[in-house]
Each structure stands twice: as structure tokens, then as C-alpha cells.
């Protein structure tokens, strides 16, 4: 099938605002595709060419894309960058430039879905010496053959900015509608979703649905080496309420680290994060621990990884993040930032999926297959009690030890991949007090946020000035009631003091109330601290900049949050 047809679907999806409308557009399109084209199209409709669990990336920077656009259209990089600054979307820029292309394209040919898909995969596989030149050539060849509309969506896909509003739930419902239109909707959607939880790839799920049918989707099972969507916890309003929720429960330390899913098959080990990212290469020390500490030959176990300091105390998540992002000198970093693995569940053992077993049974199985090395590779700390005083003492112990809080788990619950289940796990951790902070800078947005400050720099008071303590872009609506980008821009534009590229400096005048998950130490901001997952609650029109919270309060809250 021609890529032009897929570009037309993109265009319709971009204009359609309702989820049901988007679902129907995709369903009508994919039911006409062959097996190979179906899988490619499902990937491309999600703006990717690999499953979510793959660690491969297309790997094209904006600078190289501008160069490729210049080569294929004849317009200078200066012209392209100027238009990009105005429109905030290279896709729209290339669409306009291809329409008025200054040079004829020789040897151009009709673009097929297969060619576009395979070329984008080649981009990810092109590494080493001369790779940038090869990537430039591959992208230029696609753009040389592309119509204005095709060029727009090729550029957006390569840059990871497709912007057609297709979430995973829409793809799931479209597969159900396309291949099982006469079956019960809820039953079909559950079957499609189950297969996705096991495979982590809607492209493969769509192929199974088309070629093998509904029963095959229901029978999809775990495959070692392929990550499974993890069970998630809901937040409890209090420890007391959590204890009242379940009759048969256990308390576990809630570790502030990286959720890890460990797959072991013979001598091979794979490590995946909660987001299904493959981090095996970044943690060779954990791979060695697994070979020594997991007695079973074929299994999937879960746990939490934390970085420890020289005194055996947990370090903030940003230390772990450094290890996750590291590409070179990995063994040296592993030695400087040793990790501790805390295991709490097993979902597959010796060829059998354990989703049908109660958590209490799974924990007993896990205990029998792990050879612990205390402080390094161990089972998560537990306490079985419904006594509030004992639970509170255990909670205080967790916080004093530097952990986030507790997870209250129902011993009778089953493992439901990809779900937050009220009958399963409840997390209990301290509620952090909101902060009143000043907006002292920002960066210009792109795409739908072009012309707005897409990210805002927050500042706290210190000795008459203001120190950076984080950036924020969530909790702000594009339009409607409450805090919107439009309302903020009316306040902030007159206060812009200077600009350096896309970064602006703002006169400290607007105060906002900010909620967040945690305060972390951070060398990235001059306050020395950063807010984890900050979000705007409201604009404090009743506060002046001098009334904002000071660095001293952030330091005090940081000490309180983990009993320091």
C-alpha cells in the first residue's frame, strides 16, 4: 500500500477530536491491510517503528533533519530555522517547503508503507563511523520522493512528534472493532488488552487477531525475554484506611528506586523497567547477582532497585537515573554507585505463568527460589499485621531507613498485569506540603504550544534573590477553566527580561502553588534541589514574590520526607 494512504489517515486523525471517531478511522484502515503491512501500520500509527519494550531509537536530531530538509528542498538552513521558530513544528515547515520546492527531484518514486518503515528501521541500526552521513542520506532519499503531506508526517515520525492523538487505548479498541465487529465489545477489548500485556506490542497483537482469531488472543502467555506489563499500586489516603481495606494482608517497604522485571532463561538474563525499557546493558552487576542468587533456570521475578551510599543508606532516584542513562564506562559507574535489589514477586516459573496464584503463594514460591545476600540481593522487607500500632512502627522504620513508605498488599489477590487494582496493592507514603514558588524563566514551546512558554522555571527565595528549584509543564491546561497557558502568558509576556535562544528570563513576580511527589537533591539547579513530578495547583494572586517559600523551607521539607 502507498504511504500516501497512511498520510491521509494521519490527516483525518489529526482533525478528529473524539476517541470513538479516531477508533473508527483506524479500524476502517487496518482491516484492509495484509499481515506485513498491518504490523508496520500499527507501529507507524503510534509514531514508532519498534515495540515499546525495544531499546532501539531512530536517533535523528533536529539539526540533521534541518540539513536533510535543506538538501531535498533547496531552501537554506537559515530559512528553515526561521520558519521553525515561527511555527514550532518542522513537519509543517517541510510541508510548506516541499510544496514550493526550488529544485526538481531526480529518480523519485512512489513511496510505499514498506519502504518508509524499513528505511526508518535502518536509521536505528545505523551506528558508528559515518553513521550520521548515512542517516542524512536515508532521510533525504525519503523526502526527495515525498509529497508535501507525506514529508510532513515522515519528519514528525522521525523526530518522535507525530501529534495525531492516538493513545494505546485507541489502538486497542480499533483492533477489536476491525477484526471482531460482531463479538461482545467488553470481552473482545479485554482479550486484545491481555495479549498486549503479554506481548507489549499492539502490532503483533493485531496480526494475531487478524490471522488466528479471538481464542488465540485469550491464550497468549508469557515469553521469557519479552517484558510483561506490571501490576501497579493505588494510593491509600492513610495507613489506617489501607489496613481496613483487606482482611488478609502484609506490609512491605516501599523502596524509592526503579521497578525491575528480571527474566532468566538458562544462562541468559534480561532486565526491564516499569516502562518496559531494556536496561540489561546498564546493570551488569545485577545480571551477575541474578546468576548467583536466583536458583531457578527459567523464571520472571520482580523487585525494586535502589542505589546505596557508602554507609548503606538509599540515595535519591537521580543517582539511579544516572546509571540508567549511562552508555559508556558502565562497570566503573557500577562500582561507584552500587545497587541493592529488593525482590517482591514472581510471575513465571519453569514454563508456568503464576497469574492465577494468590500473592501469598507467590511470595512463598519466591522465598524458596532466592539465595539472599543481605544488603545486596534480598527479599523485600515484610511485616504481617493488622495492628495499627505495629504497622505505624514499621512505617516509621521504613521512613527512618530512607525509604518512601509502605505498600499494603492483599495476600489473597491475583497478579493482574498492567492494572491498578483496588483489591491488590495500596501504597502509603507521607503527603508532602505544597510550595509557593516564583516563575523566574521558561522555554518557548513547540507544536501546539508554539508561541507559549511550554516549560516554566521555578524559583525559591534566597538572600533577596531567587534560586532555580525545578521546571514545570504539567497541571497547566491549554484552554478552559483553571490555570491555562493562555492566562499565564498574559501575565508572563510583559515580564520577559531577556532571551537566549529558546530560553527566557522572567522578572520574578508571578507566584504559583506547586504540588510534587518528592524533593530531591540536584546539581542541575542552583538551589541544589529539584521537585520530582511538580504540577501547578493555582496562581497565587494573593502572594507577592517576597511571600514565596524560601530555600530554608525546601531544605526542611527534604529532611522531613524521609525522617532525616
Image (cartoon, helix red, strand yellow):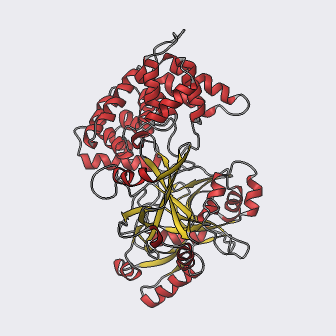
Give the camera-side residue of 371 and 108.
108
Q: Is residue 35 left or right of residue 324?
A: left
**Residue that lies at the very extreme toward the bottom in this rendered image:** 389
Q: Is residue 130 left or right of residue 8?
A: right
From this view, report whether residue 62 is shown above or below residue 453.
above
Taking the spot 37% from the left edge, 64% from the top edge, the residue there is 537
| Position of residue 503 measured from the top left corner of the image (x, y, whole percent) | 54, 47
From this view, report whether residue 199 is shown above or below residue 283.
above
| Position of residue 153 measured from the top left corner of the image (x, y, whole percent) | 44, 29
Taking the spot 66% from the left edge, 71% from the top edge, the residue there is 372
Residue 427 lies in what quarter of the image? Answer: bottom left
Taking the spot 31% from the left edge, 43% from the top edge, the residue there is 173
Residue 294 lies in what quarter of the image? Answer: bottom right
Residue 357 lies in what quarter of the image? Answer: bottom left
Taking the spot 45% from the left edge, 34% from the top edge, the residue there is 86
What quarter of the picture does the N terminus occupy? Answer: top left
User: In this rendering, does residue 296 appear at all?
Assistant: no
| Position of residue 382 measured from the top left corner of the image (x, y, whole percent) | 53, 78
Q: Is residue 371 left or right of residue 532?
A: right
What quarter of the picture does the C terminus occupy? Answer: bottom right
Give the camera-side residue of 161 and 506.
506
From this view, report whether residue 9 is shown above or below residue 347.
above
Amino acid at each position: 500500500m502507498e504511504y500516501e494512504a497512511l498520510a491521509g489517515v494521519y490527516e483525518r486523525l489529526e482533525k478528529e477530536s473524539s476517541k470513538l471517531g479516531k477508533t473508527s478511522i483506524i479500524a476502517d484502515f487496518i482491516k484492509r491491510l495484509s499481515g506485513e503491512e498491518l504490523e508496520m501500520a500499527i507501529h507507524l500509527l503510534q509514531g514508532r517503528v519498534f515495540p515499546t519494550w525495544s531499546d532501539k531509537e531512530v536517533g535523528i536530531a533536529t539539526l540533521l533533519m534541518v540539513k536533510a530538509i535543506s538538501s531535498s528542498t533547496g531552501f537554506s538552513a537559515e530559512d528553515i530555522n526561521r520558519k521553525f521558530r515561527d511555527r514550532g513544528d518542522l513537519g509543517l515547515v517541510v510541508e510548506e517547503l516541499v510544496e514550493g520546492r526550488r529544485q526538481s527531484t531526480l529518480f523519485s518514486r512512489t513511496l510505499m508503507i514498506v519502504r518508509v518503515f524499513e528505511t526508518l528501521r535502518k536509521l536505528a541500526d545505523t551506528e558508528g563511523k559515518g553513521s550520521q552521513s548515512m542517516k542524512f542520506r536515508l532521510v533525504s532519499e525519503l523526502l526527495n520522493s515525498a509529497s508535501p503531506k507525506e514529508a510532513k508526517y515522515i519528519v514528525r515520525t522521525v523526530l518522535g512528534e507525530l501529534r495525531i492523538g492516538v493513545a494505546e487505548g485507541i489502538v486497542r479498541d480499533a483492533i477489536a472493532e476491525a477484526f471482531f465487529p460482531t463479538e461482545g465489545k467488553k470481552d473482545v477489548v479485554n482479550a486484545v488488552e491481555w495479549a498486549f500485556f503479554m506481548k507489549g506490542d499492539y502490532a503483533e497483537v493485531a496480526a494475531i487477531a487478524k490471522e488466528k482469531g479471538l481464542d488465540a488472543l485469550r491464550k497468549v502467555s508469557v515469553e521469557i525475554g519479552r517484558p510483561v506489563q506490571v501490576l501497579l499500586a493505588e494510593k491509600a489516603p492513610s495507613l489506617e484506611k489501607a489496613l481496613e481495606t483487606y482482611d488478609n494482608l502484609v506490609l512491605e517497604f516501599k523502596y524509592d528506586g526503579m521497578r525491575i522485571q528480571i527474566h532468566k532463561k538458562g544462562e541468559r538474563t534480561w532486565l526491564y523497567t516499569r516502562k518496559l525499557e531494556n536496561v540489561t546493558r546498564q546493570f551488569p552487576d545485577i545480571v551477575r547477582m541474578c546468576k548467583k542468587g536466583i536458583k531457578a533456570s527459567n523464571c520472571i521475578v520482580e523487585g525494586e532497585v535502589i542505589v546505596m551510599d557508602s554507609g548503606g543508606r538509599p540515595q535519591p532516584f537521580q543517582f539511579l537515573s544516572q546509571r540508567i542513562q549511562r552508555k559508556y564506562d558502565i562497570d566503573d559507574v557500577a562500582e561507584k554507585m552500587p545497587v541493592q535489589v529488593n525482590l517482591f514477586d514472581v510471575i513465571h516459573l519453569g514454563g508456568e505463568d503464576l497469574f492465577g496464584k494468590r500473592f501469598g503463594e507467590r511470595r512463598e514460591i519466591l522465598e524458596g527460589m532466592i539465595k539472599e545476600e543481605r544488603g545486596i540481593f534480598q527479599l523485600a522487607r515484610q511485616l504481617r499485621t493488622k495492628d495499627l500500632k505495629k504497622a505505624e512502627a514499621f512505617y516509621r522504620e521504613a521512613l527512618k531507613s530512607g525509604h518512601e513508605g509502605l505498600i499494603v498488599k492483599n495476600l489473597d489477590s491475583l497478579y493482574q498485569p498492567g492494572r491498578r487494582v483496588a483489591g491488590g496493592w495500596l501504597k502509603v507514603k507521607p503527603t508532602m506540603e505544597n510550595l509557593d514558588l516564583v516563575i523566574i524563566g521558561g522555554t518557548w514551546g513547540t507544536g501546539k504550544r508554539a508561541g507559549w512558554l511550554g516549560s516554566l522555571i521555578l524559583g525559591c527565595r534566597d538572600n533577596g534573590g531567587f534560586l532555580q528549584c525545578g521546571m514545570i509543564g504539567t497541571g497547566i491546561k491549554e484552554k478552559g477553566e483553571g490555570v491555562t497557558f493562555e492566562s499565564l502568558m498574559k501575565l508572563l509576556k510583559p515580564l520577559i527580561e531577556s532571551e537566549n535562544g529558546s530560553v527566557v528570563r522572567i522578572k520574578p513576580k508571578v507566584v504559583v502553588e506547586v504540588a510534587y511527589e518528592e524533593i530531591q537533591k540536584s546539581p542541575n539547579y542552583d538551589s541544589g534541589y529539584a521537585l520530582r513530578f511538580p504540577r501547578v495547583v493555582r496562581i497565587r494572586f494573593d502572594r507577592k514574590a517576597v511571600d514565596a517559600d524560601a530555600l530554608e523551607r525546601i531544605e526542611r521539607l527534604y529532611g522531613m520526607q524521609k525522617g532525616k
